[in-house]
Image (cartoon, rainbow, N blue to C red):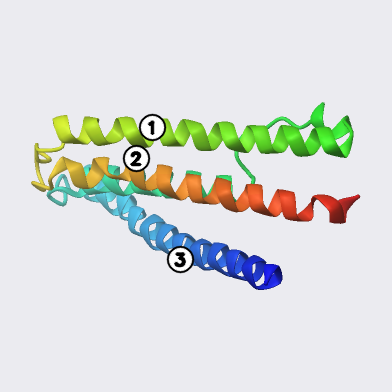
Amino acid sequence: MEDKFSSAVFKIENWMNKILETIITIVFFTIVITILLVVLRYIFNTGITGGNELMEYLFVYTTAIGSAIAIGKNEHIRIGYFVERCAPAVQLITDLFGTACIALIHIVFMNLSYSWIAKVGHSESPVLRIPMRMVQISVPICCILSILYCIFHAYKTIKNYGKEN
């Protein structure tokens, strides 16, 4: 039963990774349009209406989703110099504590973001007339994904603890 659960957890995480990395890749290649905008502006003295605004919003989503993926791959900012020299049990506790802190910070940000979006999300973007809540919702999306990745990481850390020793 536990092996089926572990297998399901790993499959869900891999599925999330593939989907999110595909989304980021597509959005990132869309951001390459920035080069076209620069060429149009400086060589032809024209532009694409709303192009700069769209690039900003795509960059926000790329950053939000990318930060969640970095947490999932354990590639976020961390300094393991001292912890890696400690006993395995101390490493486990430190890793779980750090993961819990990351999850807690994202829970707080997520809760605060809802009231923020409710207060200021009703306005529209100046050129594209996109409701700003569509851009601002990237914050709770990032937080939810990051919390899920923290749960996956904690589960894998506990599951693999006995195997590494």
Residues under numbered marks 2 and 1 in contact, where contact means CB atoms less than 8 Å apart: yes
Image x and y of residue 85, in percent: 88, 31
Which of the pair 40/128 is nearer the observer? 128
Label 2 or label 1, whichever lies nearer to me, is: 1
- Label 1: which secondary element: helix
Residue at the spot 87% in from the left edge and 31% down from the top edge: 86
- Label 2: which secondary element: helix
User: What residue would you read off at disc 2?
Assistant: 139
Tell me the amino acid under the disc marked 3: Ile
Which of the pair 50/106 is nearer the observer? 106
User: What residue would you read off at disc 1?
Assistant: 109
User: What residue would you read off at disc 3?
Assistant: 19
In the displayed structure image, the side of residue 140 where residue 95 appears, left or right: right
Q: Residue furthest top?
A: 82
Tell me if residue 92 comes above or below residue 26 in the rendering.
above
Tell me the amino acid under the disc marked 2: Val
CA separation in Å, label 2 and label 1? 8 Å
Q: Mark 3 or 1 closer to N-term?
A: 3
Residue 130 visible at all: yes
Tell me if residue 37 comes above or below residue 96 in the rendering.
below
